[in-house]
């Protein structure tokens, strides 16, 4: 079974993904795949340098992710260029990893964190969708704690569909609006239902 976990930025997707992994799922993160592929000399790193030049590299050769992010989220055309070169590479690697898991464990529940599941119309590739929701004030506070400016935060929110749209594609909605234990309990209930489906 292939399950997507999605939601807005800083909504708690990674936390829910970790819980599913703790309970027995195989977990993947498209953000982590992108991070790996954009390490120096890797496929995405090479594509980004070819497309945008070496001005987005740090002195040690690593990608200056903060600078690139600030640039592309301030310019829709540049963001589309980045997506055009990055998405095929990321999705190809996701498919490769999923196939590797299935070869070893055909009945595995594979949970993938997909931040832009709805925006990029990837929901058709997954059997089930879990949407994680949080209060926007909490999301903004988490991003500010990471050192993001209000302008950066607003640009990221503007680039994503609101929660009410993501809900349309959800099989389950996990609320991360209150205490974390309640969120974990909701996630556990979803996991139990996934196990029941997998056992049929």
Image (tube, grey):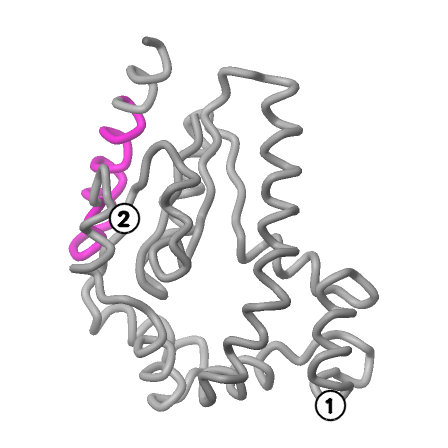
Q: Which residues are magenta?
A: 174-192
Query: What residue is pinned by disc 2?
Result: 131
The label number, if any, that marks residue 55 in the structure image: 1
Q: Dot 1: what SS? A: helix
Residue 15 against residue 53 in the figure, above or below: above
Give the percent coordinates (x, y) of residue 165.
20, 59
Mark nearer the N terminus (2 vs 1):
1
Give the percent coordinates (x, y) of residue 14.
42, 51
Count neighbours of disc 2 (C-alpha within 10 A) and say few if under 14, some if 14 to 19, many if 20 or more: many
Q: Dot 2: what SS? A: strand
Position of residue 23 in the picture relative to residue 93 (left or right):
left
Residue 2 occupies quadrant: top left
Q: Which residue is pictured at 83% across the width and 66% down the height? A: 41
Most extreme residue toward the top, as rendered?
Answer: 200
Give the percent coordinates (x, y) of residue 73.
46, 83
Residue 94 against residue 99 in the figure, above or below: below
Q: Which residue is pictured at 40% across the width and 85% down the height? A: 152
The label number, if any, that marks residue 89 in the structure image: none
Report, in whole angstroms, how far the alpha carbon at label 2 lies from the one at label 1.
36 Å
Is residue 114 part of the magenta span, yes or no? no
């Amino acid at each position: 079974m292939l399950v997507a976990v999605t939601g807005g930025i800083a909504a708690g997707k990674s936390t829910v993904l970790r819980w599913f992994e703790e309970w027995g799922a195989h977990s993947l993160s498209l953000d982590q795949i992108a991070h790996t592929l954009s390490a120096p000399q890797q496929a995405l790193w090479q594509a980004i340098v070819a497309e945008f030049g070496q001005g987005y590299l740090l002195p040690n050769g690593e990608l200056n992710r903060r600078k690139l992010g600030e640039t592309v989220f301030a310019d829709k055309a540049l963001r589309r260029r980045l997506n055009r070169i990055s998405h095929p590479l990321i999705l190809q690697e996701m498919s490769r990893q999923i196939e590797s898991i299935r070869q070893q464990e055909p009945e595995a529940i594979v949970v993938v964190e997909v931040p832009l599941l709805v925006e990029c119309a990837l929901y058709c590739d997954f059997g089930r969708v879990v949407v994680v929701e949080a209060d926007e004030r909490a999301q903004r506070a988490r991003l500010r704690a990471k050192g993001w400016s209000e302008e950066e935060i607003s640009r990221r929110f503007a680039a994503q569909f609101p929660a009410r749209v993501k809900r349309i594609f959800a099989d389950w909605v996990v609320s991360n609006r209150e205490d974390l234990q309640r969120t974990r309990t909701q996630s556990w209930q979803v996991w139990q239902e996934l196990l029941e489906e997998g056992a049929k």
